[in-house]
Image (cartoon, rainbow, N blue to C red):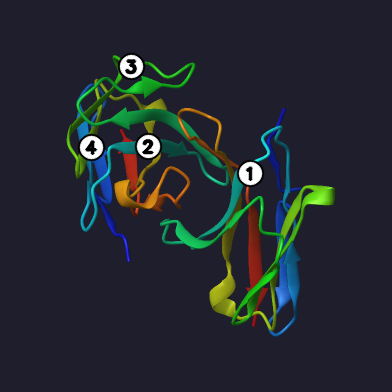
Amino acid sequence: AQKVTQAQTEISVVEKEDVTLDCVYETRDTTYYLFWYKQPPSGELVFLIRRNSFDEQNEISGRYSWNFQKSTSSFNFTITASQVVDSAVYFCALSEAGFAGNQFYFGTGTSLTVIP
Amino acid sequence: GAVVSQHPSWVICKSGTSVKIECRSLDFQATTMFWYRQFPKQSLMLMATSNEGSKATYEQGVEKDKFLINHASLTLSTLTVTSAHPEDSSFYICSARDNDRGLNSPLHFGNGTRLTVT
């Protein structure tokens, strides 16, 4: 079963619109960590945020905000007033603390295109 | 911030030759590094976990004799694609975790290597 599901394969928005990227995860661990990464066209993965399972407080960083809800196993990412530079593929990832190898489980990614 | 350097960024080689890709953590030590492969418009697929001073752990379906991994120091892991074939053409990306920041700290990724086998 897929541990991290990003149902939105591709999203296009017009510049300055808000956009939310969905992420749903599955785990039996009580301690786990969730991440978001950005992969621009150049290919490198850029770390955006880490959230542990005990901290459900939403976080805002500039135009970025994250909504973590354990009740629905979701960790959604919202970009406010999108810009062309936000165009990239965004990956949600899960790390289970109880797993010896501490492997990251990546979602399939959401490709965001911001149209000027 | 933590930096992972991956070299080369791109490489074109002929079928049958071997290619070595280096992954270095520049400002931290990493006992564990991960090698991923990414096909166009797809997610990252973990190939293997590289452990300093010991053998790498390969994921199911990944040929260890074809993808040789060496993690000789706390700052360097190498992936060698042996006897490369066109189907090995892909984007390979490494990542590392800072030893000093715990097992669930973020992975830091290299810029990736685009391999094209002709």
- The numbered dot on residue A108 is 1
Depicted B14 relative to depicted A44: above or below:
above
Up-down: is B79 above or below B104? above
Name the image quarter holding the C terminus of chain B.
top left
What residue is shown with label 3? B64
User: Closer to us: mark 4 or mark 1?
Assistant: 4
Q: Which residue sits at x=75%, y=67%?
A: A20
Q: Quadrant of residue B63?
A: top left
User: Are labels 3 and 4 on one chain?
Assistant: yes
Label 2 near label 3: C-beta < 8 Å? no
Q: Amino acid at mark 3?
A: Lys
Q: Are marks 1 and 3 in contact (CB under 8 Å)?
A: no
Q: Are marks 3 and 2 on the same chain?
A: yes
Q: Earlier in the sequence, mark 4 or mark 2?
A: 2
Horizontal side of residue A55 vs B52, given as left or right: right
- What SS does tag 4 mark? strand
User: Mark 4, chain letter?
Assistant: B
Residue bearing the label numbered 4: B77
Q: Are marks 4 and 1 in contact (CB under 8 Å)?
A: no
- C-alpha gap between disc 3 and disc 2: 14 Å
Mark 2, secondary structure of its residue: strand
Amino acid type at mark 4: Ser
* Residue sitting at x 63%, y 44%: A107
